[in-house]
Amino acid sequence: MSNEKQQADLPAHRDKRFDGVRDTWYWKLSKPLRVIVHFFLRIRNAYVHYGGVKGMYRRWKQKRGEASKRVDFGTKSFPDAERRKAEEETVFPRDIKISVLVPLYNTPEKFLREMIESVTAQTYRNWELCLADGSDEKHPDVGRVCQEYAAKDSRVLYQKIEKNLGISGNTNVCFSMATGDYIGLFDHDDVMHPSLLFECMKTICEKDADYVYTDEATFTSPNLDDLIVLHFKPDYSPDNLRANNYICHFSVFDEKLLEKTGLFRPEYDGSQDHDMILRLTEEARNVQHIPKVLYYWRSHPQSTAADIGAKTYAIDAAKRAVHDHMRDYYGIEVEVESTRAFPTIFQVRYPIQGDPKISIVIPNKDHVEDLRRCIGSIREKSSWKNYEIVVVENNSTQQTIFDYYKELESAPRVQVVTYTGEFNYSKINNYGVTFTDGEYLLFLNNDTEVITPDWMEQLLMYAQRPDVGAVGAKLYYGDNTIQHAGVVIGLGAHRSAGHTHYKMPREHLGYMGRLCYAQDVTAVTGACLMVKRSIYDEAGGLDESFTISLNDVDFCLKLRRKGYLNIFTPFAELYHYESKTRGLEEGEKLRRYESECARFRERWKEELDAGDPYYNPNFSLDYSDFTLRF
């Protein structure tokens, strides 16, 4: 038997052995004890994670509030008579017909009627509904129901397909029926919010958008208010989209884009939407996001929403869609692998070009054990070998650190330089850069420790892209809770910037799996930040007026203004032993920190007022765990 076959059979053998244990009398007898033990283990874990009883109580109140809030995104959010009248009477500056395309296949009558009626109930009236029916002969009711609605409303168009062409082929028949200026893609068992097309039309006109998408919710059939997942999405994020089809539902786009992209491709059936959205957004000149729940994805036993894991053909098609997209549009052969979060949430591996040198800059004052551990982990664990380390000494007083510097004199690729003057994080790092000659710069805190051997490769594969500015890693405290997983501007008490998923357990999947894939973010922490030297020079380095804090976020925002993307990757992992409980500095240091926050808010007022594009406005800025705003 091959190793692959043996490995494939292991879960089955394990399950059989476990089934044998579960059938024993002592396993059944011990069930009450196991329930009690597991209950207290959950309490203990919650106690640690949320910081004691007060933290647990606060989180309980949040969750209770979120649960009650969910219904507000369901039918309670539907327009009342006054609002409906106002939306129906709105005159837009452009006359746009929206063609809603729905491929049908053996659709249950209840689902079919609810789908059609959610379109006929739209407050925006200039639409057509194109229904292409690939149902088999055992489901004649699909055609009967559609023809019933078509007889009552000329905007409902129906065509029977003699032979089922698959989801892509059937949708392409819908395209042939469409006469609209914009196209909307709609699943046969889902439901629209009554204001969906109105909000899309409003965004098209106000922002001159040629591609628009909305937030969505998954509901348990048949109750539209039984919302089991609220998906609040970021604004257009190409790296997020390559890692998973976060856009999904609902999208409308200018039909002229089809001249560049073509129609659906049958070879990607199962993930045809992901393939199509990748191509459409690549060709669109202005992709806009509406941060409102306007689409309801029905979860039932046969739906993808219920269990994509059982549909391996869809997973394989999604991987091929991402791979082929990067090959066809960028000439890059990427590797696409499923992650622990979900089969269709991917790690995308970019090939590294050449063997560029990475210059690691580490500011240091005393803390010999921290620095020794940091440098030791780089030298012992890193699989990337073309690097140099520049330690920037600043005002150390302990003899032990100077003794260690003496040791480093004989270490290959390591040098120690001295910066004299008061502590200024930006100045120290900028000074350290002048002693480097690498093509890429990697700013690193002295209290970090490498975990993943390919951490530099994981950062480099993104930093080498011409559209990318700064790249940051996933950092943990010593107790394996998250210190950094990307920065959101406006988050936190000072409304300057804060870290998402802060203090969550290391193995947490994150909101909608965000801790499991590389993604576009507004900023990353300077505790571990890679940037191409030429881009660092273009941005003028770190702003030395930010002496203690926010210099890294300021730097990332400068990069964004220049048109670069900043990326957080969870696949470069390090410990960052910064104390979780140190709190704010006191006295002069506290005043300086508050002064820098005020200057940051003034400098980046426009960006702060607009909100972080990668953090949905439905989330609270008071918490880092994607708590809903109330």
Image (tube, rainbow, N blue to C red):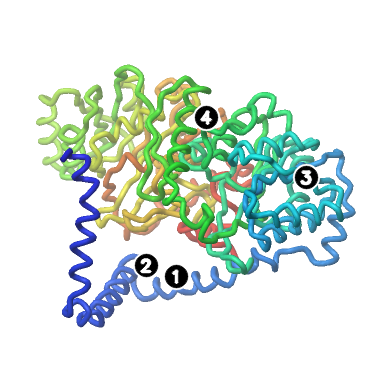
Quarter of the image for residue 178 reads top right
Q: Nearer the viewer, residue 192 or 332?
A: 192
- In primary-sequence order, the first of circles 3 and 4 is 3
Comparing marks 3 and 1, which lies closer to the viewer? 3
- In primary-sequence order, the first of circles 4 and 2 is 2
- As helix, strand or loop, the secondary structure at mark 2 comes to helix
Q: Which residue is mark 1?
A: 59
Contact (CB < 8 A) between labels 1 and 2?
yes
- In primary-sequence order, the first of circles 4 and 1 is 1
Amino acid residing under circle 4: Tyr
- As helix, strand or loop, the secondary structure at mark 4 comes to loop
| Distance in Å between CA atoms under marks 1 and 2 | 8 Å
Q: Which residue is mark 3?
A: 201
Say which residue appears at 70% left-offset and 61% top-offset: 114
- As helix, strand or loop, the secondary structure at mark 3 comes to helix
Task: Residue 499: tell me if it is visible.
Answer: no
Q: Which residue is mark 4?
A: 564
Q: Position of residue 127 (x, y in %)?
A: 81, 46
Amino acid residing under circle 2: Tyr
In the rendered view of the protein, which quadrant contains the N terminus?
Answer: top left
Q: Nearer the viewer, residue 536 or 378?
A: 378
| Distance in Å between CA atoms under marks 4 and 2 | 36 Å
Q: Which mark is residue 50?
A: 2
- As helix, strand or loop, the secondary structure at mark 1 comes to helix
Q: Position of residue 74 (x, y in %)?
A: 65, 65
In the rendered view of the protein, which quadrant contains the C terminus?
Answer: bottom right
Q: Is residue 73 left or right of residue 196?
A: left
Judge the density around disc 4: few (<14), some (14-19), many (≥20) Cα neighbours within 10 Å: some
